[in-house]
Image (cartoon, rainbow, N blue to C red):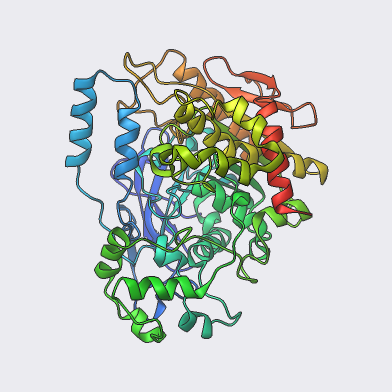
Amino acid sequence: MTTTSATARERPVVQLAQGRARGVWSDDSAGIALFAGLPYARPPVGELRWRPPQAPQAWAGERDASAFGPWCPQATGEGVYAEALVAGQGFAPEETAARIAALKAAPIPPMDEDCLYLNVRTPMDTSAPAPVMVWIHGGAHQSGSGAGDWYQSDGLVREGVVLVTINYRLNLFGYFSHPALSAESPWGRSGNYGLMDILAALEWVRDNIAAFGGDPGNVTLFGESAGGQSVSEVMASPLGRGLFHRAILQSGVYSYMHHEVADAPGADWLARASLAPADADAASLRAIPTADLVKALMTVMPPAGGFMPGVDGHVLPATVGQAIVRGETAAVPIIAGYNADEGTLLHAFIQGPSTDLPGISLNPAGRLDAIRAHYGAAAEALIRLYGLDTSSEAVKGDIDMLGDDLFGVHARHLARRQTEQGRVAFLYFFNRTPPGPGPHAGAYHAAEIPFVFDSLSDAFARAPGDAELTRVMVGFWTNFARTGDPNGPGLPTWPAWHEADPWMVLGPKPGVETGVRAEKLDLLEAVLAARIGG
């Protein structure tokens, strides 16, 4: 590792495979450096749009690594969800309105198809190679960036890890499939470019992280929502073997998706958007201006299921659910879990108790029939447990069930299968809620992120005990990155998952609880297992 002394005047330097890069001191007193905007692949533009990522090019001289790279193109960024998050903090109405106004007035981050960059935070002068944590941001595979404000903290790094946050191609730029693109693919299928980007970033980490004091033989892959789902996709991909050694899945396991990539829907969508005829060739597709594609994302209904990862026979040989059941995922220890009120901020987008039943909240006459048809023998018990047949409670029941059906059951099912296969799994349940005086969103989707990163800012309503909860969660996550076990001095004892169903409850008083929502999750897991099959 090449470095300068940790002074405010001399910026830190590393020598990478592609050339020298000069970062900035993030925390001068602690000797923590930030190297931002490092390319891990060639820009996926022009002839490289909708192709697998290519190795990054070398540069001459010294690269300035003080600024983040552009966000990958996306329709809305994270604005709509961010507004809902602010509204869910429980602030007084006037304060909520002011905060949302300030959020809307904030500048839109620069976006560009040239977006395959990552950022490294490092303690630099490590006495021994440090564990590495690679973060995959969420955003439904459609939006977000590794440069998001929540992730820009030194909290994890102060505990002795090297932190990497990455961008990857999103929405149609990352998951578009088309006959012309499949015809030129060596494995005869297109799509999954965003997933291939994540794999390329991990290869870059393997080859370069030692320059930052990191240990390429001790890499923890972690992410939230679509980031957690992406972790499970990498676990299920044979192309990810050996690139990481532990995994943390926060509110996201991709076993809820059961589809293969298909070319026809993409071709039809481009035709509906008047961007290209269904029989367009690959050169014509790559010539469509970026701005036109982004505009179409906002104005033309995407194919059913949207532009998402899927089985392609190569990057993903089988669905994530099938890989989990068959024991074909990477044999690494995991932490997985979800939040108590995942559905509060998501129901407005889904309008149902499951992503398999979108919009049924808007159809009172047919909602129970749809639930019975989808959940079969488990339906009546689920209707009773969630109050789905009570008109005054139906939306609340949808919200409660949505979190369990989309996140909770998949986390526990993964832990169960891991344990059956002789692997180690730890489950958590996050239930800290905002303390504001007004109505709040509870332990909403993504609420745990600032506690993991120690990035709880004034944008969030503070609660007594938040500092202690942050200390505990940072300790658990970094202990796990070091050893594959979250336990350590000064922390509650967290048992590995077993049939007694222990969960670490992360809230005002962290501790173990058995059988979290067990009756509900048992029913949902039986439906999930039947759908996946053996």
Q: Residue 364's image quarter?
A: top left
Q: Is residue 372 left or right of residue 191?
A: right
Depth check, front residue: 439 or 290: 439
* Residue 26 coordinates in the image, percent (x, y): 36, 40
Q: Is residue 156 left or right of residue 268?
A: right
Residue 135 visible from this viewpoint: no
Q: Is residue 524 above or below residue 238?
A: above
The residue that appears at 68% across and 60% down in the rendered structure is 241
* Residue 508 coordinates in the image, percent (x, y): 52, 15
Depth check, front residue: 193 or 204: 193
Q: Is residue 363 above or below residue 231?
A: above
Depth check, front residue: 465 or 364: 364
The residue that appears at 46% across and 35% down in the rendered structure is 445
Quadrant for the C terminus in the image: bottom right
Residue 232 visible from this viewpoint: yes
Q: Is residue 449 above or below residue 21?
A: above
Q: Is residue 261 left or right of residue 350?
A: right
Depth check, front residue: 467 or 1: 467
- Residue at the extreme front of the image, as rendered: 365
* Residue 251 coordinates in the image, percent (x, y): 54, 39
Q: Residue 446's image quarter?
A: top left
The residue that appears at 31% across and 30% down in the rendered structure is 86
* Residue 39 coordinates in the image, percent (x, y): 41, 64
Circle count: 0
The residue that appears at 64% across and 38% down in the rendered structure is 409
